[in-house]
């Protein structure tokens, strides 16, 4: 069994699709680091001068019209409070202040979770593509039949292929996340601030990184299982893209009630240890006017863990049953 | 393992396989009883679609049989296939390897999967005549080289039984001869080679014994000579001093007669005594009388005539 998995790992890392996916991951990692640099770097002299000009202009307008603007704002607030007594239009904060101009100093502890979140989505996608291509290519090229004439125990073969897809993603995910963690630390440390990165913050980041690695591995397993079920990389990727475009994109607004079952939200809840979402609740008031409002809800970590876990187990199990019984051509 | 199956490399009883497709059910193999003796080359003949490849796939555990039993080298398959697979090398239809990997890399992965040392890969590549092309990508190989790589792969196991499914499909004459020589040589080494083909001439040239199937059923089986010899000769070669006179007499008697290489070939009868009697009545005396043996092609056509099967392609 270990021997078969070792062979599959060798094959995985010899594949061109794996190399292309790795290169893609590296390029996207570099782009993410570049985006971090853009966010962390202080304003240049010319940008600062431009900001100063803009502030002076706003200040000039405030000096001329400020009291009137505050009065208008307060009047609008009174009007708004008729519908919602808690309405606050922030009339006390509309005066332009230099502290609100320019660029806030980026902090590592605040920046890193969003970097990790983006990276984990990228890794999940890479894992899915690698897993799907790794297994489906064997069916479409016909080499699966040849392989089974050397090792006819199908469950062993299946386990070794999925095992290799999952194990193969481990070093890739660890490398990408380490690169991002270290790169972001260096960039933010040089241009902005790493203050406040306490042991607790590191602990949270480590846990989030761990969950990102697990998500990538699960995506690779799901991709490989779908590769077994559909036997063509293009078919698997077509289904994945179809889901993203249709379910997560086009019909998302119409699917308010099923948001807790959308993959993207569950990924977020898994990574961030819970995620808020705002389904629209629509109603007709006493005067007959129809209105919709986003209501804050929490998708718990437990929900996302169970949901994603069951999905992966179902896919892997179904693919195992199919592979065990299917005639191989 | 029974004594009977111990002497057989392959044995199937009542083997049946049905495929379902959009048009309904298609019976590929129906109650096939096949015996392949140990050692030598055994031809597995049948027209396209007669169930040869499905039978081979069932023997190798790639396709599940609906019913029936199979043994390979005395082991019940597919149940005991893992125990015997190390002794069985097989090429099913066209060779299928990873196209982006080199020939050597493909074989290295297979060798590693079955725990064979890496050194054996170069050995079998040499044996298959691919020693200097092992590093090239599989997709750049010609059909003949792909076939040779597939043979090299079967040799990784040091098998006792080799199963070649249509091994010369698409090969040029030199490639065909090479593959035939390889099969012959493996048979002479005491290995059992099962070669399936729809090309009768090919099987006749390399096989010691033969099984003929049509519509998924066994039509005939035995040594090549027996299978041919069991069929009635349908023509006679006749030597006589006056060919013209003899031809006229026999033609007048309702027989179809042609001159060929200084002899008469009389078609439509295998009755030598009748030919001799007719000619002797006209003072023409036979100096040569030979029944023309049916070749495998005519045997095949005769056997499959009642099955309503399509005629196979011309032998190469």
Image (spheres, grey):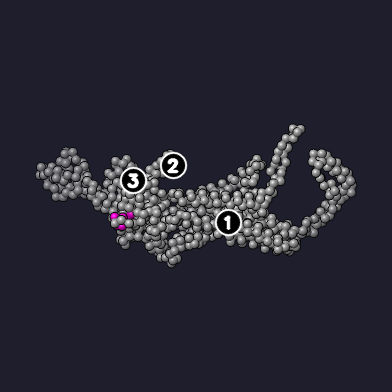
Q: Which mark is residue B31?
A: 3
Residue labelled with disc 2: B21
Left or right: A85 in relation to B265: right
- Name the N-terminal-most of marks 2 and 3: 2
CA–CA distance in space, label 1 to label 3: 47 Å
On the image, the x and y values in percent for residue A161 come to 50, 56
At 39% from the left edge and 46% from the top edge, which residue is drawn? B66
CA–CA distance in space, label 2 to label 3: 21 Å
CA–CA distance in space, label 1 to label 2: 36 Å
> Residue B164's quadrant in the figure?
bottom left
Camera-nearest residue between B265 and A194: A194
Which label sits in the foreground, 2 or 3? 3
Callout 3 environment at 10 Å: few (<14), some (14 to 19), or many (20+)?
A: some
Name the subunit of mark 2.
B
Residue labelled with disc 1: A217
At 80% from the left edge and 44% from the top edge, which residue is drawn? A86
Residue range in magenta is B4-10
Disc 2 element: strand
């Amino acid at each position: 069994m270990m021997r078969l998995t070792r062979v599959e790992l060798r094959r995985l890392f010899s594949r061109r699709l794996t190399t292309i996916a790795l290169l893609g991951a590296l390029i996207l990692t570099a782009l993410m680091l570049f985006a971090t640099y853009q966010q962390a770097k202080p304003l240049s002299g010319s940008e600062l001068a431009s900001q100063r000009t803009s502030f002076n202009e706003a200040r000039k307008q405030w000096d001329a019209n400020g009291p009137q603007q505050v009065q208008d704002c307060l009047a609008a607030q009174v009007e708004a409070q008729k519908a919602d007594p808690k309405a606050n239009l922030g009339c006390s904060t509309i005066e332009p202040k230099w502290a609100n101009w320019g660029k806030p100093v980026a902090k590592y502890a605040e920046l890193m979770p969003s970097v990790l979140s983006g990276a984990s989505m990228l890794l999940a996608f890479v894992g899915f593509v690698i897993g799907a291509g790794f297994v489906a290519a064997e069916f479409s090229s016909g080499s699966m039949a040849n392989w089974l004439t050397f090792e006819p125990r199908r469950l062993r073969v299946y386990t070794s292929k999925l095992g290799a897809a999952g194990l193969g993603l481990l070093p890739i995910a660890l490398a990408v996340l380490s690169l991002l963690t270290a790169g972001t630390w260096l960039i933010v440390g040089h241009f902005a601030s790493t203050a406040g990165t306490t042991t607790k913050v590191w602990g949270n980041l480590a846990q989030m990184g761990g969950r990102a690695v697990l998500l990538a591995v699960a995506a690779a397993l799901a991709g490989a299982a779908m590769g077994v079920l559909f036997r063509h990389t293009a078919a698997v990727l077509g289904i994945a893209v179809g889901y993203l475009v249709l379910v997560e994109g086009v019909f998302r607004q119409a699917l308010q009630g099923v948001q807790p079952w959308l993959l993207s939200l569950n990924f977020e809840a898994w990574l961030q240890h819970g995620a808020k979402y705002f389904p629209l609740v629509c109603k007709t008031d006493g005067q007959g006017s129809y209105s919709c409002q986003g209501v804050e809800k929490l998708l718990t970590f437990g929900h996302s863990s169970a949901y994603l876990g069951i999905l992966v187990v179902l896919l892997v199990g179904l693919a195992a049953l199919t592979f065990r019984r299917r005639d191989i051509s | 393992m029974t004594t009977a199956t111990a002497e057989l490399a392959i044995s199937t009883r009542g083997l049946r396989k049905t495929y379902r497709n959009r048009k309904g059910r298609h019976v590929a193999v129906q109650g096939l009883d096949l015996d392949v003796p140990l050692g030598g080359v055994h031809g597995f003949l049948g027209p396209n679609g007669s169930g040869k490849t499905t039978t081979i796939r069932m023997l190798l555990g790639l396709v599940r049989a609906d019913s029936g039993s199979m043994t390979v080298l005395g082991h019940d398959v597919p149940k005991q296939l893992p125990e015997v697979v190390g002794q069985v090398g097989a090429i099913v239809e066209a060779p299928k390897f990873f196209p982006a990997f080199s020939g050597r890399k493909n074989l290295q992965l297979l060798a590693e999967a079955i725990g064979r040392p890496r050194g054996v890969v170069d050995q079998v590549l040499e044996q298959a005549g691919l020693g200097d092309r092992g590093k090239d990508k599989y997709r750049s190989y010609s059909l003949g080289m792909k076939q040779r790589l597939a043979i090299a792969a079967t040799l990784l196991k040091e098998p006792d039984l080799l199963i070649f499914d249509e091994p010369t499909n698409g090969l040029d004459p030199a490639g065909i001869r090479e593959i035939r020589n390889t099969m012959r040589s493996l048979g002479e080494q005491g290995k059992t080679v099962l070669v399936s083909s729809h090309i009768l001439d090919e099987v006749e040239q390399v096989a010691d014994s033969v099984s003929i199937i049509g519509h998924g059923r066994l039509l005939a089986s035995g040594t090549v000579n027996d299978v041919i010899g069991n069929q009635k000769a349908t023509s006679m070669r006749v030597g006589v001093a006056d060919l013209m006179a003899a031809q006229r007499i026999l033609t007048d008697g309702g027989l179809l007669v042609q001159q060929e290489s200084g002899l008469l070939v009389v078609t439509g009868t295998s009755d030598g005594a009748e030919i001799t009697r007719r000619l002797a009545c006209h003072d023409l005396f036979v100096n040569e009388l030979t029944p023309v043996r049916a070749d495998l092609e005519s045997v095949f056509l005769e056997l499959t005539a009642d099955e309503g099967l399509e005629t196979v392609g011309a032998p190469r």
